[in-house]
Amino acid sequence: MDRLRAALVANRLYLVVAITGGAVLAIETLAFRVLSPYYGNTIYSFSSVVTVVLGALSVGYLHGGVLADRFGSYRQFFLLIAAGGGATLLFFTLAHQILPAILTWMPSLVWGPLVGSLLVFFAPAYVLGMLSPYAIALICKEQPEAGIGHIAGRTFAFSTAGSIIGSVGTGFFLIPYVTISTSLTLISLALIVLGLLGLVGYTGLRRGEVSLIVLAAGALAAGSVFASSPTSGFVEGEPLFRADGRYEQIAVYDTTMFGQPARVLLLDRSFSSAINPITRDLVFPYTTYYELYQLAEDPPERALILGGGSATVATVLHDELPGVSIDLVDVEPLLPEISREYFFMPNSPRIQFHTDDARRFLTVSTSTYDLMFSDVYASLFSIPGHVVTEEFFALAADRLAPDGLALFNIIGSLDPRAPSLFYSTLTTIESQFPGVAVFAVQDPHRYQVQNLIVLAAHEPFGAELGERLRAAGLTRFVPHQVDTTHLDRDRYTRFSDDFVPADLYNARMIRQQEVRSEAQFDPRRAEATIEAFMELPRPYLGNSRRGETIDWLEEALSRTGVASVERQTLTRTDSEGRTYTLTNLIGRINPEVADRVLLGSHFDTKRYADRDPDDPQAPVPGANDGGSGVAVILELARQFAGSGLGLDIVLFDGEEGFPELGRSHTEPWKPLGSTYFVEELDALYPDRPPRLVVVPDLVCEHGIEVPREASSVAYGGHYYRAFREVAEEQFPSHFPSDVRYQIGDDHTPFGEAGIPTFLVIDYEYPAFHTTADTLDQCSPTSLMVVGSALELFLENLQTTL
């Protein structure tokens, strides 16, 4: 016993260093759990914590050595230990005030975690980092006969051993069984007590020191206990349940969503699942896609749900199909109990809840399933990389019965710009499943982040999938199908265990969404503009009611957010002596900006459908040739109204020329409104003409193809090359790189006047100048492609003007 006591006395500072080393690793492990509710369990969050802690330790080592050489006192050493505990308690107590503020100021998943970690975790790690070099200096004074190398080696050995114990203890015992706030409070108080004991044992306490330290520690400990949870504030009201899970913080709330009562499961900041507690219906629309099992010839006998959450899908499936057996898999051990107590999961032998990782379960399982529903990607802030690789999907394919169906819920964007998290995941799924179809839960023609359902099978679905859906009574899913036939799969990375940059792609997607915000080009709204345009009198020259349409267009232009709208009126007489009044509409965004870009398109339609084989005397409806260009530039005006770009939106009249052109007179065609606009340029632009004029026309045809246009190559110069580079890179199947024709349009007068200009047109339009140019010829997808290509080009152009 005496020998043990002597050994402890001789090694007491080594033991102190071991304890503080364990505290450092415990704090680092817990720091990741503190940060993840705000920025997700991403590689960026993990790397940010490690980077900040290591950086703080290195600075602490440096300053600790300086302090030890200068003072070298036991009092200061143990005060530093107590200060480290106090700093830990203080900054982690403030974390749930600091991190939400940082999230609001810097929502980036890349840099946000780094800034948040710096503000919350640096100070405690810095103070604790001073201790090892300080301990070495003190031990050298105690044991001058021992070499410095021997003392330094033993110090780092004890510190590292303590770190190992701290890491294992935190991961295997504290996190699974103790709340994060309690764990941090205990560690902080342990450091404070250790500092106090050292002060008592080595130097004695000065008057008031104990009271001051105990009072401060008590106040901070109380604050940490009552500090708000990171799940607070995302849902109003008090939670029905809240706890620290093994992998995230868990809360259950009763609230209202989608206009109905909802009981929601919140995992960190992500809504995991929800059910109507009164009707027990599913609340989240994406979860209803389990109904696609009805595409199979027979109901499923065995179903697998990965990422089970609160078992809402499993419960509904269990009640709907009396013969189905369901395996439910989720990594969080608390979820089975929560599912039964709060989400009505029955105690049924037909539902087996497995606490396991989805991929590990597929690896060890020998069962095959008729239906598979994977919801493991349900958080925008955390992409588990090991379940988006071709190896994972190969396992899923192996476990899917020959006639089975697999559903993968992925939160992503249909924005085709590479790199793309969703399209890389889709390409990876396609590498393992011959049959793949995609459904957009919100809108298949929008690029906003949304739930995207990938339906996979061992056999191709073919073009008749829509008919199969209707035959199965699943008609409501048909409009949500996404056309992916135009995608160039080679542009997207196929994820593998060796290379899976999912977090990087996710961060880029979120950053793109932040840039787009609500200003994103909306093809549905553009389509609605065409539909409204088609209900008005046809605005061909000579129609006595065309003024109604011009009035409507003026009002529509003013609603886009332009600073002003003015009319430019002109009269023109044809060779037969008929006089027509024309009106150009001009809207200006940021009129004070000197460098101007002009977006223009014609709104007039053709009086005679001269290419119509059946009724060439009828007027052209003009959905594409008249409506589509207007719809695109009005939508772009809405988008850029709040930007700093100097943009002019011009709706040209008379692009079709005189009504009798080619009939009773033979004078050459020219676009009347844009020609007059160019003639009046000096009055409209007294300082300098527009830097660039862009004219979209005939841009809504289904399966649109916009090749290069010869006059645009000549007139557009580097602007046209820049646009084509963007368009051909992002939409290669819609923007072929060959030159097919030279077209005269509203851009022509500008090009002839020496102003850079280009035309965006799909001239190979079967309904051109026929009565078939109606609304059904227009595709929201085509509007999205053209609008988004112009949007990206203008965003890039804005940075160079």
Image (cartoon, rainbow, N blue to C red):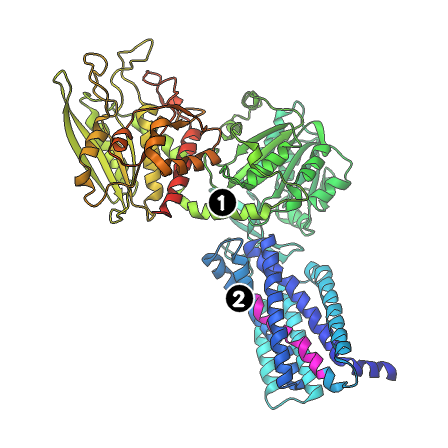
Relative image position of residue 690 (x, y in whole percent): 26, 40
Which of the 4 image quadrants contains residue 430? Answer: top right
- Tag count in the figure? 2
Q: Name the residue under label 1.
A: 257
Foreground of the two, 795 or 363: 795
Q: What residue type is labelled 1?
A: Met
Expressed as whole percent of the image width and height from the top left, the position of residue 52 reads 59, 64
Q: Can residue 77 be seen in this view?
A: yes
Vertical arrangement, residue 445 with respect to residue 48, above or below: above
Residue at image position (63%, 86%) is 71
Residue 765, compared with residue 274, is above or below; it is above
Placement of the N terminus among the 4 image quadrants:
bottom right
Residue drawn at point x = 58 percent, y = 44 percent = 378
Of helix, strand and loop, which one carries label 1?
strand
Q: What is the crowding at mark 1: few (fewer than 14 residues within 10 Å), some, or many (at least 20)?
A: some
Q: Position of residue 488 (x, y in %)?
A: 54, 31
